[in-house]
Structure formats: C-alpha cells, structure tokens
Image (cartoon, rainbow, N blue to C red):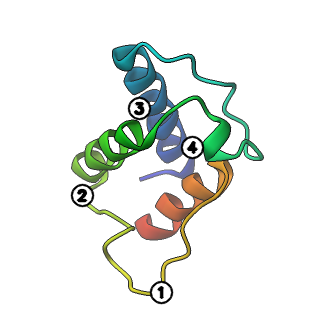
Amino acid sequence: MATMNIRREIIAQFIQVAEEQGLQLETLTDNLPLLDSGLDSLCFAMIVARLEIQFGTDPFSTSEDIIFPVTFGEFVHLYRDAAT
C-alpha cells in the first residue's frame, strides 16, 4: 500500500473514531503526542483493530522488540514499516 494511502487511512480512522466517541480530536501533526490527541485508550484499541482489518497486519503484535509510538508521526511510521 502506498505511503500516502497508509497515512490517509490512519487519519481517517482517527477522525471516525473521535466522531463516534464524541471526542474532540486535535490537529494530527507528526509531532502531536498521542496522549494529547484527544483520544483515550479505548479509541486507540478501536483504531488498531480497524487498521488490522484494513492493512492485514497488527504491528503491535508482530514483534517482541516493538517500541511503542509516542507521537502521531511515530504511529504512522510504525504502520509504514509494517507494510514494507
């Protein structure tokens, strides 16, 4: 999947989950800390589950050496790396 399509799909999922949960989503920039995004842990679980369906992989469960993302940019890069 093309790099921009991965980013676009991740952004779409963040927006959709925030809307479904009635939460105010901050502007998604690469430097935005995930903890400041406006989403909670349930939202992130929903996003990861949906992205696993979309991309056919869950980068959080494919490696024991995973470094969990802190920023939105790191989150996107995690999925980009898993797709290659």
Closer to the eye: label 2 or 3: 3
Disc 3 + disc 1, Cβ < 8 Å: no
Q: Name which quarter of the figure residue 68 lies in.
A: bottom right
Q: How far apart are marks 1 and 2 (CA)?
A: 20 Å
Q: As shown in the figure, which amino acid type bears the numbered disc 4?
A: Met
Q: Name which quarter of the figure residue 43 lies in.
A: top left
Mark 2 lies on a secondary structure that is loop
Question: Which label number is shown at residue 56?
Answer: 2
On the image, the x and y values in percent for residue 67 come to 56, 75
Q: Mark 4 points at which residue?
A: 4
On the image, the x and y values in percent for residue 45 come to 33, 46
| Residue drawn at 59 percent across, 61 percent down | 69
Q: How far apart are marks 2 and 3 (CA)?
A: 15 Å
Q: Mark 3 points at which residue?
A: 13
Q: As shown in the figure, which amino acid type bears the numbered disc 1?
A: Asp
Q: In this view, does 56 lie above or below 67?
A: above
